[in-house]
Image (spheres, coloured by chain):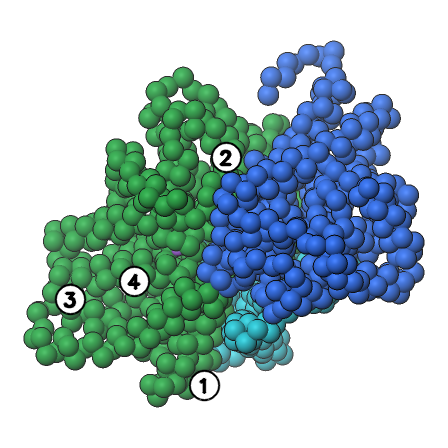
Amino acid sequence: MGATPPTRPYDRFLWRPVKGLVLAFAALAAAGVLAMVAVTCADVALRLLGRPLVGAYDLVRIAGGVTLACALPVTTALKGHVAIEYFFHKLRRRGRIVVDTLMRLLQMTAFAVAARECARHGSKLLRSGEVTPTLQWPVFWVAWILAAACGLTVLVTLYHLVHPGREMIRP
Amino acid sequence: SGEKADPARPRPIRLTYSVFFPPTHVQAREAVQWAEAVEQRTGGRVKIDVFAGGTLSKAEQCYQGVKDGISDIGMSCLAYTRGRFPLLEGLDLPVGYPDGLAATRIANELAAKYQPAEIQDTHLLYLHAHGPGILASKRPVRRLEDLKGMKVRATGLSAKIVELLGGAAVGMPQPETYEALQKGVVEATLCPVETLKGWKQAEVVGAVTDTSIIGYSTAMFVTMNQARWDSLPPDVQAVFTEVSAEWIDRHGAAWQVADADGQALVAELGRETITLPPDEQTRWQEAVRPVLQGYVEQAATQGLPGQAFLDDLQRLVAAARD
Amino acid sequence: MSPALIGVLGLLLMLLLLAASLPVAFVMGVVGVVGFAWVINTPAALAMLSADLHDVLSNYGLTVIPMFVFMGQVCFHAGISRRLFRAAYHWMGWLPGGLAIATVGACAAFGAICGSGPATAATMAAVALPEMRRFNYADSLASGVVAAGGGLGMLIPPSVVFIVYGVLTEQSIGKLFIAGILPGLLVAALFGLVILAQCLRDPARGPAAPRFPLRARLASLKGVIETLLLFALVMGGMFAGWFTPTEGAAVGAAGSLAVAAAGGSFTWRLLWRAAQETVRTSCMVMIIVAGATVFGHFLAVTQIPSGLAAWLAALPLPAWMILLLIVAFYLVAGCFVDALALIMLTIPIFYPVVLQLGYEPIWFGVMIVLVTMMGAITPPVGVNVYVVSGMERDLSLQTVFRGAIPFLVALLAAVALLMLFPGIATWLPGLVR
Ligand code: NA
Ligand code: NA
């Protein structure tokens, strides 16, 4: 992973920490999947013993939310989102550069907006005092993690914009 | 859709209304009729587009959605956003509601009396609440002991109730409950008898225990975006208030009819309905008392008059049971 | 400007951005937010974006998708699925397209555990697709069968679509589930025929293997044992009432780890890789669902789906023609909108009409699931196709769409058969009282 050698001076100071963050989020996401499996299995086992894990439902929802939010930057870095590239490949070189640049700028704007809105959504949830139904844990922070993930995705897209034709992280 | 381009008449005020009930549910139909009544009595100056089944905002996001203007009006359960309505949460307590009409009337009376700060960021039109939660189980439950260790589908406040009754609360979404009951993943569910028909769960339970002595409810709000409300002309506001006041009893009555239908289906399928003897009823009431205590204490930490609210609630319920 | 016109402009903008190669999920999200802002207002549209993102990503019914994907990934990385398909190759490989036919069977079997189409497609894309490609099956056939076969997860009970339909129309969910069984088997058989026909005409699409001697075949059965154990654990546990189908995903994942450990193929690296792939695939799927949700909210406020449905329902035509038009409506609308949202918006309009025309409610439910299966594989928005193409990164979307089209024909044939012989759907539930 991350086998591309640094080609520009700012690679070391900007992109390395970004890559590190993306991988850290990915690790958290993977941990989230294992947590979902573990909590569900524990609930099933304890239920068979007559003592179900109260709030397992809440825990799985939270773990799922964290997993999917944290997976966003790495999925984008791997260019793992599905796109229809049929028409794009019909374009000439200049056309491709123009379209690609425009789309990346649009994508960056979209995620910047999403980051801001998710952060605000989290603040609204914090102020409202909303908690999970059974365990009564606060829920706002999941929205904040989502906001951070969207923000990181803006940087990942910027990387793709200035390094055309290259994934930030190789699968 | 049949609007004529009449230059003398201004274009109607268009409002969106998000309802979490599926469009065919009787409460969604009441919402549509409420909207039609508002349209009619404003002489067509207001046009309300109803989006049922959560197609505009999901049940959990409905209240915040109204605040943010995703929909102008919204109907959902207070309990879906736990913690957001710390005082009105008391309406869901297992105080022994006799029926949906009483629960609905009481909810509105208390909301009007206490005017809780938690709902002041939108314009509350009215509340309604379902009939008492009962216990539908695969094996008959006649005494508290029968419930010991039984796996009961319940989330949130009702999970607490199940635990206090000695059962084991299992959380799962309503759509999965049918199969879970069928296969025995859970052995019972705590819900209004109406749900047994709406979600078809009557097909897969063996008996229904009338636990209305500790009947809890789920209060639902119908509320409007504050800025939108403020922008309405006073006479239009008056129509909203008038129609809403009328619809309180209509929703309540609809809950009663729905419960009766649910009960009829239970009987039709030949499922036993169990009535608890008086001394057993007292035991169940005693068992769930800590939930009421917990509510009062929680409210107190937030500086809310939980004790007074509960006292009023119990007084009104007692009056309604007579 | 009228909301309907904005809706049409939104659809056009969507097609334009799709052609410009912006990822599908982002296209739907961007168009949904811009369109909603136009019809309602900007603050509401922005609030909707964050609310939908947060809701989709932490919705219990959807958060289970990662668990199903994880189960498939563990089976793949531990070599469990490879050994299973080796056995399938020994027994069915002589048949042209035999492995693809075996994959249809696997989809049907997995559909009996899983109620969601995309999750079934994701699992099979992890398990069956690499194996078919290893045996030199044409990319389009191998990916098309997985995308289409994933739909069997919705037709064969349990099924999320049947539950939603049952609640909307006040029909027995149990009867709907039972009604799905025969049509599910019918569709699986039709899929098999489609594969066979393709491979007989062009043997290179699914190259037949020589017949293996009986001893080699029997020896290959050893590879099935692990899968059988897993299947017995998950199905047995479900029927014994130990866990729900949703929880079965977690049990299956843990079980496949245990099987891998018992077989000596477990490593921490395996666990890590399986988890990483799961994370990437699930995120890709869920972001598409989130985009479709945002877009669906925009379309809802344009009133296009409900307006179109109401107009269709009022046409003065014979019953069977209206029904065909309804099917066509879902086929076209399913190209753009998420199936469940579409059903919520339109069933209340169509359902009374269908009853008035004299059709059976249970039967119509099966038809709805069939058209939903079609929607999942028709371009430009075909969720199952996205899932498959997203998991096998060197497969372009058009390859998968192209591979799925023959199966669309099979689904249309199933619709025709159901119209001619409604008993396929109504006979079994009629036996149950
Ligand atoms: Na299924
Ligand atoms: Na489609």
Give the CA distance from mark 3 to mark 2: 44 Å
| Residue identified by numbered label 1 | C268
Give the CA distance from mark 2 to mark 1: 49 Å
Nearest to the observer: residue B192 or residue B233: B192
| Residue identified by numbered label 3 | C93
Neighbourhood count class around disc 1 (C-alpha, 10 Å): few under 14, some 14–19, many 20 upward: few
At 69% from the left edge and 28% from the top edge, which residue is drawn? B35
Give the CA distance from mark 4 to mark 1: 28 Å
Disc with the residue nearer the chain's start (2 vs 1): 1
- How far across and down, in percent of the image, does residue A13 sit? 63, 79
Nearest to the observer: residue C302 or residue B24: B24
Numbered mark located on residue C397 in the image: none
- The answer to which quarter of the image holds residue B112 is top right
Residue type at numbered disc 3: Gly
Residue type at numbered disc 2: Thr
Say which chain tag 3 marks: C
| Residue identified by numbered label 2 | C346
User: Which of labels 2 and 1 is toward the front?
Assistant: 2
Task: Identify the colour of chain C in the image.
Answer: green
For label 2, being within 8 Å of ligand 2 is answered: no
Q: Under tag 2, what secondary structure?
A: helix
Neighbourhood count class around disc 2 (C-alpha, 10 Å): few under 14, some 14–19, many 20 upward: some
Task: Identify the colour of chain B in the image.
Answer: blue
Residue type at numbered disc 1: Trp
Disc with the residue nearer the chain's start (3 vs 4): 3
| Residue identified by numbered label 4 | C106
- The answer to which quarter of the image holds residue A73 is bottom right
